[in-house]
Amino acid sequence: MKYLTYILRNARRNPARTGLTIASIAISMFLMMILTSFFAAMQEANSASRQYNRIIVMNANGFAGVVPIARVRQIAAMDGVVAATPFAWYGGKYQNQRVLFAQFGVDADSVFDTLEEFHLPDDQLAAFKADKAGAVVGPKLAREYGLKIGDAMPLQGDVYPVDLKLNIHGIYESPRNSDQRMVLFHHDYLDDQLRLLGPSSSSGSSATQPSGRAGNAGIVFVRCKDAAATAALCKKVDDEYRSTDNPTRTQTEEAFGQMFSEMMGGMKDMVFWIGCAVVVSLLFVAGNAMAMAMRERTMEIAVLKAIGFGKGLVLTLVLVEAVLVAGLGGALGTLGSKALFDLFDVSPYTGGFLPFFYVPWRVALAGLGVSLFVGFVSGVVPAVMAAGSSVVDGLRKVV
Amino acid sequence: MSAPPSIELRGVEKEYRRDEFVVPVLQGLDLSVADGEYLALMGPSGSGKTTLLNLVAGLDVATRGQVIVHGQDLGRLSEGQITRWRADNVGFIFQTYNLVPVLTAAENVELPLLLTKLSRKRRRENVATALRVVGLEGRERHYPRQLSGGQEQRVAIARAIATDPFLLVADEPTGDLDRGTADEILELLEQLNREFEKTIVMVTHDPLAARRAGRILHLDKGRLVDDVINDSAAAAG
């Protein structure tokens, strides 16, 4: 501690250089946080879903296929199932805007039993259930569009050639790492609208045509009694429908989320290599700054060693200074990004791509650790050179 | 029986290697310096003054021969031991002061004290005492850039005496100062020698500065060519 004054003053000796070094590390780490947090937050949300003991039923052919709506009831009746609800993606426009938030047709009676972490006051839930054109919206979406209970919410069909005239009856609450920008409405309402189109509007494969979509859901969310039941239920559901026109693929919600992550497997690798490149470039930036600082202080270091500062102490002083500068830049970049994204919701600006975004603590702390590592490694060479420099050579210009 | 010498050099030779060339700097040097003596080293450039100073101060090691200071053969000490020995026994005064520009006068003086086990309070007391001795009370918080050359050299002297070493080595301590300021610094060194009984070894080109010392050595081509007791300085003392 008694050397702290000396270290801090040295770090501030060339404010422009130190400031630029800190800024370059801070900006790099800030960008790193954005890249890595995207995957980390997704993974964190996936892992968090494990506690809810849910499984997701989808068509074995993927999202191109459908799950007949009748199966929701059949699955809900299976042993070990608490509740089940369809989730049918609508994908409409609101106020002539492109899809900026998710709209799902669900079973109003079971959706909040299935998604137990989503909460809706009883009176709002009752009103939602009572009105076939009723809908509930997420709090972020309500804030963003100034939506209130009692407001009408017309959605213009984009994927489906049907428009929905929804009435907002509730604003749900849900954890931060869940989608708080959804619109949930009665699946029956969408189904009715699709049936009204009649068979004349469809041709070819029924499942891919608008009216052919009637009576189907995209996926089914199923809440199981406990974790032990999930694996057996996945198998049971798939076995049940294996020999039908629409065989299913059932997996835990966590696995379902990971499936999305795996779709971006190449992206993950790319982010990893970008991260490595950033670390290497930071090593050069910080290392060069420290090397320049040490070159300027050759005589001063010689004087310190002359008056009794040992090799180890000189080495430590230089290393601590390097770690301090890099650590400060890292703290600004990592903790700054965490604070910024905690306070500022970027999801509205991602075109619906990110329903939530934040920098998890473990990512921020890992980033800070990387910064300290960069400081340490970048300081090693200048520190070793300073510690090993000859006092006589260092003083030659003055002695 | 007389007291053993404070500094003793026996058959000291020093060579430097420059690529494939071996450059002899000091040759067959024998010297005894008593405790409390004030020694001026003179001679032309390249005569070996600074090398001799470095050997006596434990900054460099002799190629051959022995450098014994206070009974300690410096050539037998490890690098860590000699660093510790310098911290305990030697104060350095340089021509260009060599203060740390980002530290205040008091913090510069405190630097060698950081290596001791003294408490912060004691360190501050020692710093205040050292700055008072060199006449810089009230300048504790001034940075080197806020001081004149003479004042900077006084801070450097305060740093050199802060740990109360027995030996002060000064290399051209007045080389960068005007005559008046140089005299003040030389007066201060005399005072440290006279009142605090510091052994001083000073390299100088300045005959007026050398006349302040009690003994003047002349080196030429690495050999001691003259060793004069300066009676006028002794008389003044």
Image (tube, helix red, strand yellow):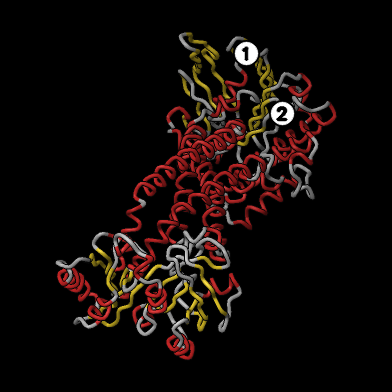
Q: Which mark is residue B173?
A: 2
Q: Identify the amino acid type marked 1.
A: Gly
| Left or right: A316 as drawn, with respect to A241 | right
Residue drawn at (60%, 29%) of the image: B34
Rendered location of residue B236, percent (x, y): 79, 29
Residue A324: image location, x then y, percent: 54, 49
Q: Amino acid at mark 2?
A: Pro
Front-most of residues A294 and A249: A249
Task: Count up the numbered dots.
Answer: 2
Element at label 1: loop
Q: Residue furthest right?
A: B180
Above-or-below relation of A377 to A36: above
Residue B46: which disc?
1
The relative height of residue A337 versus residue A307 in the rendered view (above or below) is: below
Crowdedness near tag 2: few (<14), some (14–19) or many (≥20) residues, C-alpha within 10 Å: many
The chain holding disc 2 is: B
